Amino acid sequence: MILLLEVSGQSAYFPALATVGVVGFIVAATVGSIAWYNSKRPVGWKDKDRPDFVPGVDK
């Protein structure tokens, strides 16, 4: 168990991987939100306006 803790504690790549994971999640959530807002509206949402911060996409 001590050897496992020593090996895992010496990883120089963990901060970089954590940063890439967090930034990647934020980018994926942002792109997914824009795509969802630009998709066809479900029943009951047809007359709702798009939020101002979501860019329009020409089809």
Image: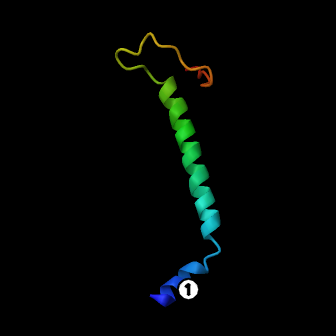
Q: Could you tell me which residue is drawn at 55 percent across and 30 percent down?
A: 34
Which image quadrant: the C terminus? top right
Coordinates of residue 3 in the picture (x, y in percent): 50, 90
| Residue for point 62% across, 58% down | 19
Which residue corresponds to the image point at 57% horizontal and 45% vertical from the top-left?
26
Q: Secondary structure at mark 1?
A: helix
Tell me: 36 left or right of 27: left
Farthest-out residue, left: 43
Q: Which quadrant is home to the N terminus?
A: bottom left
User: Relative to 52, does residue 33 appear above or below in the rendering?
Assistant: below
Q: Position of residue 40 (x, y in %)?
A: 43, 21
Query: Would you place residue 14 above or below residue 50 in this image?
Result: below
Q: Outermost residue, bottom direction?
A: 3
Whole-percent x and y of residue 41?
42, 19
- Residue nearest the observer in this picture, 36 or 8: 8
**Residue that protrudes farthest toward the top in the picture:** 47
Which residue lies under the disc numbered 1? 6
- Rendered image quadrant of residue 44: top left
14 lies above or below 52: below
